[in-house]
Every structure is written in structure tokens, then in C-alpha cells.
């Protein structure tokens, strides 16, 4: 099996998972991949962060599925949300059609949040969200957690989380 882990990571959480997966599989790894970087592999694993409900860089895969035909594909999204099933279902249904979900593996790996590591643009976006959250009188647990994370970075990443993805990739 010739496999590659391709990923995009803004603040390092996806990078950490990508490195763990590549170590576990003993395979190649590529940051900020282009299509030509992944075409020569039988198995393509793509990871990216969740940003405002989107999946950083996943279009490289979803827009090129015709060119990736015959390959085993696994996706992993890294976010700071707790990964509740019904919430992640909404996300995955936006990324992949029901048909695609039958043969493409998709996994949520919880990352973290570190305000100090954000780009200027993301810092500004998050500051706006912070103001909005502060104005909200009755915050959900997730909203409060998000607000707390502005001052104290949180990191939920755990090597154990890669196991289901690794098993999917290794099974025939
Ligand atoms: C502007 C912005 C938007 C975000 N939106 C989401 C989101 O919709 N859902 C989520 O779970 N996490 C969200 N996050 C948190 C990131 O997904 C999280 O920090 C992730 O670990 C980033 O991975 P990366 O550093 O590899 O890009 C957001 C973070 C920023 C800065």
C-alpha cells in the first residue's frame, strides 16, 4: 500500500494528527498539497481544520474525485468542538454526498484552540465572535468553553483518537 497523509493546518493541531497518522502507517506526509502531490498514491488521507463550519482545503479532494477514482480515501477534520454526533453529521453531509460517504472514510479528531497562534485575519474574526458571545446572556456550555479558551489555550488532541482512521486505512 502506497499511502500519503496530506494536510493543511493553521495553528498546528491538524499537523500534529497528520504526523501521528504518518508515523503509525509509516507513510509519506505533505503539507499544503496540490493535486500532483497525491496522484501517485493508492491511499490518500486528507486532514484540515474546521473554520466557521467549513473544512480547510477539502476541495482538493471533493472537487477532484474523478481524478482520484480507484484510490482509498480517508478524510479527517480537526476542530475544537466536542464532536457531538448530530452536529458532526450536519458537517459531513455538507462535505460528502450520501453516496460518497459509503466509500470515503471520514473522521473527526478533536484539536484545540490557541488564540495567540492565529493569523491577523482569524484574530479579527474571533474578536468579533467574542464580542457577540459576551453579549449573549444565556450561553451554552460550548459557547462558554469557547469564551474561556480565548484566555487559556485548550488542547484536546490525543494520539489514541487516530485509531479508527488507521483501522479504516489498513482494512482491505
Ligand atoms: C476563525 C475560526 C473559526 C473556527 N471555526 C470552527 C468551527 O466552526 N468548528 C470547530 O469545531 N472549530 C472551529 N475553530 C477551531 C479550529 O478548528 C481549531 O482550532 C483547530 O484545532 C484548528 O486546526 P489547525 O490549527 O490545524 O488549522 C475555528 C477557529 C478559528 C480561528
Image (cartoon, rainbow, N blue to C red):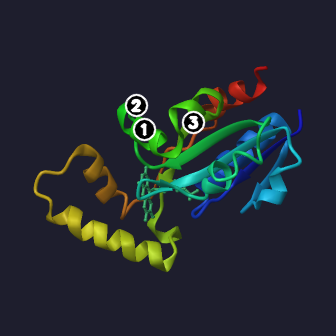
* Mark 3 vs 2, N-terminal side: 2
Can residue 50 be seen here? yes
Question: Label 2 near label 3: C-beta < 8 Å?
Answer: no
* Mark 1 vs 3, N-terminal side: 1
Can residue 83 be seen here? no
| Residue pictured at 48% horizontal, 49% vertical | 79
Give the answer, above or below, for where 126 lies relative to 44.
below
| Residue pictured at 40% horizontal, 45% vertical | 81
State which quadrant residue 153 falls in.
bottom left
Question: Label 3 near label 1: C-beta < 8 Å?
Answer: no
Give the answer, above or below, for where 75 lies relative to 135.
above
Q: Which residue is mark 1?
A: 88
Q: Position of residue 28 (x, y in %)?
A: 85, 47
Q: Which residue is mark 3?
A: 107
Q: Which residue is mark 2?
A: 85
Q: Residues within 10 Å of mark 1 (few under 14, many from 20)?
A: some
State which quadrant residue 104 falls in.
top right
Q: Secondary structure at mark 1?
A: helix
Q: How many marks?
A: 3
Q: Secondary structure at mark 2?
A: helix
Query: In which quadrant will I find the N terminus?
Result: top right
Give the answer, above or below, for where 19 lies relative to 101.
below
Q: Residues within 10 Å of mark 2 (few under 14, many from 20)?
A: few
Q: Position of residue 159 (x, y in %)?
A: 64, 37
Question: Label 1 near label 2: C-beta < 8 Å?
Answer: yes
Residue that extends furthest to the front in the rendered view of this protein: 66
| Residue pictured at 68% horizontal, 47% vertical | 46
Q: How far apart in space, not on screen, are marks 2 and 1 (Cα)?
A: 5 Å
Amino acid at each position: 500500500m502506497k499511502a500519503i497523509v496530506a494536510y493543511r493546518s493553521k495553528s498546528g493541531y491538524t499537523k500534529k494528527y497528520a504526523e501521528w497518522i504518518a508515523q503509525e502507517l509509516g507513510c509519506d506526509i505533505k503539507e499544503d498539497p496540490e493535486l500532483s502531490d497525491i496522484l501517485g498514491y493508492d491511499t490518500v488521507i486528507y486532514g484540515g481544520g474546521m473554520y466557521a463550519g467549513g473544512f480547510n482545503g477539502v476541495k482538493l479532494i471533493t472537487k477532484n474525485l474523478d481524478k482520484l477514482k480507484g484510490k482509498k480515501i480517508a478524510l479527517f477534520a480537526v476542530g475544537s468542538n466536542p464532536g457531538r454526533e448530530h452536529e458532526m453529521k450536519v458537517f459531513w453531509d455538507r462535505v460528502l454526498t450520501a453516496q460518497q460517504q459509503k466509500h470515503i472514510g471520514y473522521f473527526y479528531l478533536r484539536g484545540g484552540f490557541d488564540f495567540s497562534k492565529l493569523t491577523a485575519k482569524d484574530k479579527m474574526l474571533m474578536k468579533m465572535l467574542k464580542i457577540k458571545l459576551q453579549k449573549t446572556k444565556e450561553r451554552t456550555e460550548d459557547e462558554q468553553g469557547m469564551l474561556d479558551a480565548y484566555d487559556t489555550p485548550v488542547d484536546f488532541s490525543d494520539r489514541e483518537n487516530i485509531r479508527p482512521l488507521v483501522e479504516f486505512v489498513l482494512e482491505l
